[in-house]
Amino acid sequence: MNKLRALILKFKSFRRIQKVVLLAFLLALAFTSVRIVHTATDMVYWHKHQDEPLNNWMTLHYVAHSYHIPPHVLYETLEMPDWPPDRRSLKELSQALDIPLETLKSKLQQAIVYARPPYPRPGPPQRHNRERSR
């Protein structure tokens, strides 16, 4: 308790600029700590969710991230533009594209196989008719 009281008295004796610098340091420390925890939880999550079996609720970006392949490979397989990113689930995509869900999953699985070793890495996405905002 005496140490806390001494610390408070020390803080009160600080000049205004010292208090501002200390506050900025504490804010930077808090922000960095939150980002470290966020990064660590992401790492643990994606480590456990590698090569997950395709499920109806997944999006194309989730599948691409889980299988470590570029998302444009999956979009090209389904003959869809990769921009803007499509946030629909596989089930919604199968309904929108009028493809049975199992056929869609099969196409994606085949694309995943050919996008990974021992096959050559896929090239960059083909960008046609993409308007860039300026």
Image (tube, helix red, strand yellow):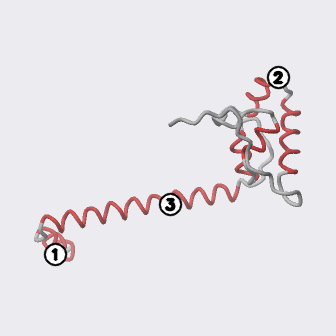
At which x and y percent is residue 97?
Answer: 79, 25
Disc marking residue 6 = 1
What type is the residue that disc 3 sits on? Answer: Val
**Crowdedness of circle 2 by 10 Å Cα count: few (<14), some, many (20+)?**
few
What type is the residue that disc 1 sits on? Answer: Ala
**Crowdedness of circle 3 by 10 Å Cα count: few (<14), some, many (20+)?**
few
The mark lying in front, picked from 2 and 1, is: 2
Q: Helix, strand or loop at disc 1?
A: helix
The mark lying in front, picked from 2 and 3, is: 2
How far apart are the two marked residues, 1 and 3, measured between alpha carbons? 32 Å
Q: How many marks?
A: 3
How far apart are the two marked residues, 2 and 3, measured between alpha carbons? 42 Å
Residue to which mark 2 is pinned = 98
What type is the residue that disc 2 sits on? Answer: Asp
Q: Which residue is at 87% across, 39% downward? A: 107
Residue to which mark 3 is pinned = 37
Q: Is residue 93 above or below residue 31?
A: above
In the foreground, 133 or 103: 133
Q: First in sequence: mark 2 or mark 3?
A: 3
Classify residue 19 as left or right of residue 121. Answer: left
The mark lying in front, picked from 1 and 3, is: 3
Q: First in sequence: mark 2 or mark 1?
A: 1
Q: Helix, strand or loop at disc 2?
A: loop
Classify residue 55 as left or right of residue 100. Answer: left
Q: Which residue is at 18% across, 65% downward? A: 19
Q: Helix, strand or loop at disc 3?
A: helix
How far apart are the two marked residues, 2 and 1, measured between alpha carbons? 72 Å
